[in-house]
Image (cartoon, rainbow, N blue to C red):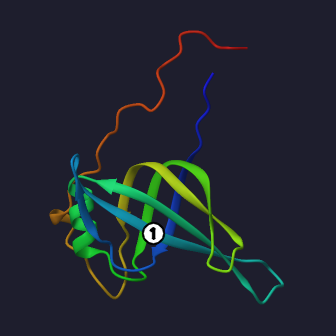
């Protein structure tokens, strides 16, 4: 039976979202971070997240998302890695499919909810199985 990792995350954007286009339509790369402060420690630990949003959600994210904007992102994930310029390997959690991406309200900036499209309901990532494998 195939397995899938899903995740819901609340974080902050690294910066403005760029709207891009390919042969399948418009899309936006969403990069954001979360932080954890361990009790009794001075240092915060940061986690970097990344994924792509397509369609109408990409358009309003590109228009409304600013550096530090609070985001809610839900979808399927995997661990990705890359080599930094100094040769060390670094890791980030990547969304392979973002099912929902929303900007959250901030006290200092009210957002027009009526201008945002409703989140899309994606096709199931895994076909239904008639029998339980165990």
Q: Residue furthest left?
A: 115
Residue for point 22% across, 73% down? 63
Residue for point 69% across, 74% down? 87
Residue for point 48% across, 71% down? 32
Residues 128 and 31: in front is: 31
Residue for point 16% across, 63% down? 114
Q: Quadrant of the N terminus?
A: top right
Q: Is residue 115 left or right of residue 82?
A: left
Report the number of numbered marks.
1
Q: Secondary structure at mark 1?
A: strand
- Image spot of residue 50 (x, y percent): 48, 63
Please tell me whether residue 134 is drawn above or below residue 79 in the rendered image. above
- Residue density around tag 1, few if under 14, some if 14–19, many if 20 or more, within 10 Å: some
Q: Is residue 56 left or right of residue 17?
A: left
Q: What residue is disc 1 on?
A: 31
Q: Residue furthest top?
A: 131
Quadrant assignment, res 111 = bottom left
Residues 52 and 46: in front is: 52
Quadrant assignment, res 17 = bottom left
- Image spot of residue 68 (x, y percent): 43, 82
- Image spot of residue 48 (x, y percent): 57, 70
Q: Is residue 44 left or right of residue 25?
A: right
Please tell me whether residue 100 is drawn above or below residue 125 in the rendered image. below
Q: Quadrant of the C terminus?
A: top right
Quadrant assignment, res 62 = bottom left
């Amino acid at each position: 039976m195939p397995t899938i990792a899903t995740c819901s995350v609340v974080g902050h954007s690294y910066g403005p979202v760029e709207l891009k286009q390919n042969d399948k339509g418009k899309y936006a790369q969403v990069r954001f971070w979360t932080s954890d402060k361990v009790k009794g420690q001075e240092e915060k630990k940061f986690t970097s997240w990344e994924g792509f949003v397509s369609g109408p959600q990409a358009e309003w994210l590109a228009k409304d998302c600013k550096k530090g904007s609070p985001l809610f992102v839900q979808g399927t994930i995997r661990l990705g890695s890359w080599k930094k310029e100094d040769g060390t390997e670094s890791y980030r959690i990547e969304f392979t499919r973002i099912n929902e991406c929303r900007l959250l309200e901030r006290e200092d900036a009210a957002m027009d909810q009526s201008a945002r499209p409703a989140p899309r309901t994606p096709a199931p990532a895994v076909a239904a199985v008639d029998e339980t494998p165990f």
